[in-house]
Amino acid sequence: MKQDMIVILDLGSHENTVVARAIRALGVYSEIYPHDITANELKALPNVKGIIINGGPNNVIDGVAIDVLPEIYDAGFPVMAAGHDKALCEVKLAQFANDEDAIKDAVKGFVFDTCKAEANWNMKNFVADQIELVRRQVGDKKVLLALSGGVDSSVVAALLLKAIGDNLVCVHVNHGLMRKGESENVIEVFKNQLNANLVYVDATDRFLGLLEGVADPEQKRKIIGGEFIRVFEEEARKLAGGIDFLGQGTIYPDIVESGTKTAKMVKSHHNVGGLPEDLQFELVEPLKQLFKDEVRACGVELGLPYEMVYRQPFPGPGLGVRCLGAITRDRLEALRESDAILREEFANAGLDKKVWQYFTVVPDFKSVGVKDNARSYDWPVIIRAVNTVDAMTATIEQIEWPILLKITDRILKEVPGINRVCYDMSPKPSATIEWE
Ligand code: XMP
């Protein structure tokens, strides 16, 4: 790694990620490490220019006061402390405000004047470094990657492709619950345009067969998740022998959120997602240092299409949690078509760049309507559009009437089996973002 680094030592502050982001926004790379890192471990990290100890009244975990090791102050790095009353370091701050711009102002002098860090953190350098690191890790062996078409797996695929070319084997499993055009898009971009080694598995009948008659949301999720692993495992076995590595779209929040020193290991196990133990892969996780917005910037640097890099979040179980109750092919089709209309009209109105997540839902009940002067008895479509920062809470987007009316009109005209359109007004809480 060529980049200079500011290390943040974690004393349990919730602000750590904001501090790391603020420093990276200044163009200097920053990583968070556990409070009990030793001076030797610290010295072994590449290009450390300074340390920020970030604590506060919450320097207590499970009733035990925690602190950095005294040897850290003698390790030879400039130290800044925020909300921490150690008298040993040169620079002290009362406490950070949980605000990226305020933190940038607070740390700028320390980062550049005291630590003499160079602003050399950018995506071009990051991509070049990771390509080199992946080549060193993998050599001429093969890497298997589950390519869903989501932002993280797409960016990993593009990066690994640059690093190892044909030695990357991507597997795209279509569970039949993808949005309109999504699998086709993955094939078009990765197979046709980027010439990736892509195995496409259409497992639609398999998934829909297993889901037939299953109405319970949790059971639906379990079936989809479990079957996904079985299909991927089957493909892995076919290819096994020649494959030693598994690519993963793990990103920085996945690692930081799991907290402790053991976080990396715990998350790796979790991410492998229940693959059987006799399929033993070493993990390749080139995005594990990036925040979500940096993953997108990395995708842009790698030349991926805008729509792929800036697409809205899409749940693993896909349309399965939006086709409520027991999934039927006719309602699934109505869901896919209405969702495509919604996305098209949101893009026309510029809302795709403004609204965090938007989709349609088709419930499993019908209502009476009138069509072509005759009684109809059809499904409703529910529109949902929400804004959130972290998906823990959400507010609804207040869409202008003319846009909603246009979407309603198109859905009623173009989607068979639908006679009503409703708008979901519920924030999270009390609702969740998805309906199941
Ligand atoms: P909820 O419905 O819990 O959703 O408010 C919060 C966010 O998480 C997404 N979501 C999922 N993402 N696998 C995923 O990768 C899942 O099983 C899953 N369930 C919900 C949801 O779309 C929203 O963005």
Image (cartoon, rainbow, N blue to C red):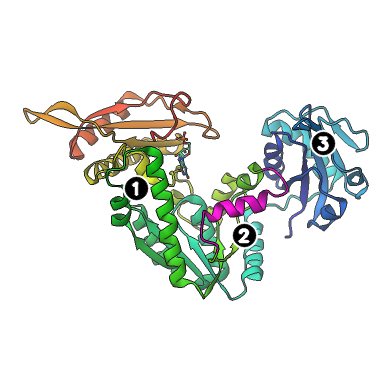
Give the structural element (helix, strand or loop) at label 3: loop
Neighbour tally class for label 2: few under 14, some 14-19, many 20 plus, Cα within 10 Å: many
In the rendered image, residue 76, in percent from the top left (x then y), is placed at 91, 50
Res. 338 image quadrant: top left
Q: Is residue 269 magenta?
A: yes
Calculate the distance from the C-alpha at mark 3 to the C-alpha at mark 1.
48 Å
Q: CA distance from mark 1 to mark 2?
A: 30 Å
Q: Can residue 289 be seen in this snapshot?
A: no
The kind of residue tagged 2 is Val
Type of amino acid at the residue the image marks with label 3: Ile
Q: Residue at x 44, y 54 (%)?
A: 149
Q: Is residue 245 left or right of residue 119?
A: left
The mark total stands at 3
User: Considering only order in the chain, which callout, 1 or 3, is on the residue closer to the N terminus?
Assistant: 3
Residue that label 2 marks = 127
Mark number for residue 66? 3
Report the magenta residues as a range.
259-277
Residue 148 to residue 313: above or below: below
Q: Amino acid at mark 1?
A: Arg
> What residue is at 90 percent from the left and 33 percent from the top?
86
Reading the image, the residue beneath label 1 is: 179
Residue at x 51% of width, y 31% of height: 388
Of residues 319 and 27, the one nearer the viewer is: 319
Q: Earlier in the sequence, mark 2 or mark 3?
A: 3
Q: Earlier in the sequence, mark 1 or mark 2?
A: 2
Q: Is residue 144 above or below residue 80?
A: below
CB within 8 Å, label 1 to label 2: no
